[in-house]
Amino acid sequence: MPIGSKTILIVEDEPLVRFDLIDLFEHAGWRVFDAGNADEAIAILDGHKEIRAVLTDVQMPGSMDGVKLAHYVRDRFPPTVLFVVSGNVPIPQHELPVRTTFLSKPFDHHRLLRQLEAGSAQNM
């Protein structure tokens, strides 16, 4: 798939939230990969170089949280569009990698979709 393809990895440990997001993006024409933690996400990213967007929750089980995963993704796959979401305390922008958007839960799914599509179009 081309670099600008609409392909996203959703990293969320809450299955109902993850399935809701998968459904949203698939209905909007995105190819969706999903993971329940950062370790699964890294394995998927390593095997699917066509992924151009990552949406990750902050708190999840495993070897790293969503903020650390976002830094890993930015370092390893620089053009990736990154969204970090949390239902708890907002993450200060200075703790996030450059060009990362933070969203507080609950968030407007359709606004998120518009932001992601705009970010993906810029990285084509």
Image (cartoon, rainbow, N blue to C red):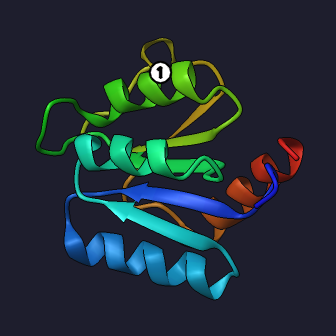
Horizontal relation, residue 74 to residue 122: left or right: left
In the rendered image, residue 53, in percent from the top left (x then y), is placed at: 61, 49
Give the quadrant of the N terminus: bottom right
Horizontal relation, residue 21 to residue 76: left or right: left
In the rendered image, residue 22, in percent from the top left (x then y), is placed at: 45, 76
Query: Closest to the observer: 47 or 84?
Result: 47
Q: Secondary structure at mark 1?
A: loop
- In the rendered view, would you say 47 is above or below 65? below
Q: At 39% across and 79% down in the image, what residue appears?
A: 20
In the rendered image, residue 91, in percent from the top left (x then y), is placed at: 38, 27
Q: At 58% across and 82% down in the image, what residue appears?
A: 26
- In the rendered view, would you say 91 is above or below 39? above
The residue lying furthest to the top in this view is: 94
Q: At 48% across and 84% down in the image, what residue appears?
A: 23
Crowding at mark 1 (Cα within 10 Å: few <14, some 14-19, many 20+): many
In the rendered image, residue 100, in percent from the top left (x then y), is placed at: 58, 31
Horizontal relation, residue 67 to residue 77: left or right: left
Query: Closest to the observer: 21 or 4?
Result: 4
- Quarter of the view holding residue 71: top left
- In the rendered view, would you say 13 is above or below 46? below
The residue lying furthest to the bottom in this view is: 27
Q: Which residue is mark 1?
A: 96
Label 1 amino acid? Leu
Q: How many marks?
A: 1
Q: At 54% across and 18% down in the image, what residue appears?
A: 75
